Image (spheres, grey):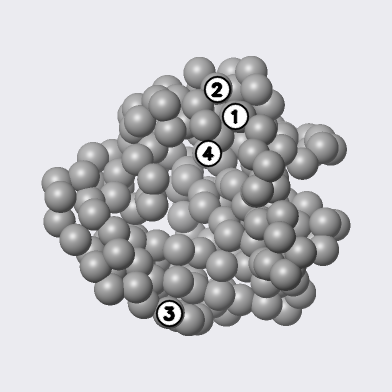
Amino acid sequence: MVDGSVDIQMDNPGGPPVVIRSRTSQDHALITRMYEEILADEVDFFIVNVRDSLEIARWFEPNEFVQTIALVAEVNREIVGEAVLMRQKNPRLSHVGNIRFYIRPEWRKAGLGATLVSSLFTQATRIGIEKICIDLPDPAARKFDSMLTRNGFSREAVLHNHFRSGSGEKMDIVIYGRDLEELWHRISDWVSNYGRAMEY
């Protein structure tokens, strides 16, 4: 985990405040609970099985090969979303960050995704990340392709039959990429002008 805290409070008219902060080891149970309640048809949106408690436990362990920045959105002591960036510690690859993010359904299209992801990009630029990649199994790629394209990402590769779904079906993984500096300017403008950039 990268040192350094983030603490941002989002406006939530008529409701409790939303706090965006760095994920800590004390969030293990809350993160596990959030993914236990994920919609069944969204489980295969992730490369890893987010319903596997052992997999989630590994997210909170030190990793000598990967550096991680993880932010969460918290409401009334419940985590309603997270955004995570990982980069290889190999200096030949350390300018590239791979991200994943998830927002609970009831908090989508409210600007939370944009705020989480833009906050993550701010942290990424501070540690020298120059490029962002997103690896999506085919179901997620089909759902989010237009959103990612709209935000300046492009398909860079397709790994055929590289992913096995929870039901055992083989699927492609689609890799999206985007230069972070240019993307950051785009996201910042949209957040400033419209309050949200990603409609997820």
| SS at mark 4 in the image | strand
Give the mark nearer the N terminus: 4 vs 1. 1
Residue hosting label 1: 60
Compared across the picture, whether 80 is left or right of 25 comes to left
**Does the residue at mark 4 contact the one at mark 2 (Cβ under 8 Å)?**
no
Q: Position of residue 119 (x, y in %)?
A: 72, 51
Tag in front: 3 or 4: 3
- 3D distance between C-alphas at marks 4 and 2: 13 Å
Q: What residue lies at 78% left-to-right and 52% top-to-bottom?
A: 123
Would you name the residue on which mark 3 appears? 157
Q: x, y percentage for residue 34?
A: 43, 29
Query: Reading the chain from its start, which is encountered first: label 4 or label 2?
Result: 2
Q: Secondary structure at mark 2?
A: helix
Residue appearing at x 56%, y 51% in the figure: 113
Give the crowd class for mark 3: few <14, some 14-19, many >=20 residues within 10 Å: few
The reply to whether discs 2 and 1 touch (Cβ–Cβ < 8 Å) is: yes
Identity of the residue drawn at 38% across and 52% down:
47
Residue 188: tell me if it is visible.
no
Tell me the tag on residue 81. Answer: 4
Q: Earlier in the sequence, mark 1 or mark 3?
A: 1
Q: Identify the residue under disc 2.
A: 28
Lateral position of residue 128 relative to residue 14, left or right: right
